[in-house]
Amino acid sequence: MGDRFREVEETFALLRRKFHERAISQREYIDSLKQLRVKDEEGRFWMIGAQSGRWYCFDGGAWAQAKPPSLLERKIVCI
């Protein structure tokens, strides 16, 4: 699972660079980021914030900033 999170981070960095270089529009940037959502082994959804670049976990009611399992040695913590 950790590899998937790293892949998303790498793709995010590429998309962010393209957006800042105006190679893609804001709509293309946001739509592409939506495709990068990850579902972990516990069934939780994860995404990287478009502006912050930080990971967020959906706790069933709201998105909360959290560290993905790859950064917590496979432990999942939603704040």
Image (cartoon, rainbow, N blue to C red):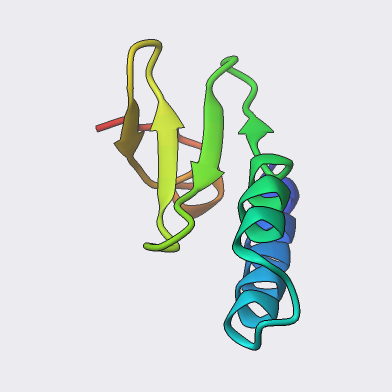
- Where, quadrant-wise, is the C terminus in this rendering? top left
Q: How far from the left and from the top, in percent, is residue 75?
A: 45, 35
The image position of residue 78, as x and y in percent, is: 33, 30
Q: Which residue is drawn at 41% across and 41% down?
A: 56
Numbered-mark total: 0
User: Which of 73/58 is in front?
Assistant: 58
Is 72 placed above or below 60 here? below
Dividing the image into 4 quarters, which one contains the N terminus?
top right
- Seen in the image, is 43 located left or right of residue 79? right
Q: Which residue occupies the foreground of this view, 72 or 61?
A: 61
Q: Which residue lies furthest to the top in this view?
A: 60
Q: Quadrant of residue 18?
A: bottom right
Residue in front for this viewpoint, 45 or 35: 35
Question: Which residue is depicted at the point 60% across and 73% down?
Answer: 16
Q: Position of residue 51 (x, y in %)?
A: 41, 62
Residue at 57 percent across and 83 percent down: it is 20
Identify the residue at image location x=65%, y=41%: 34
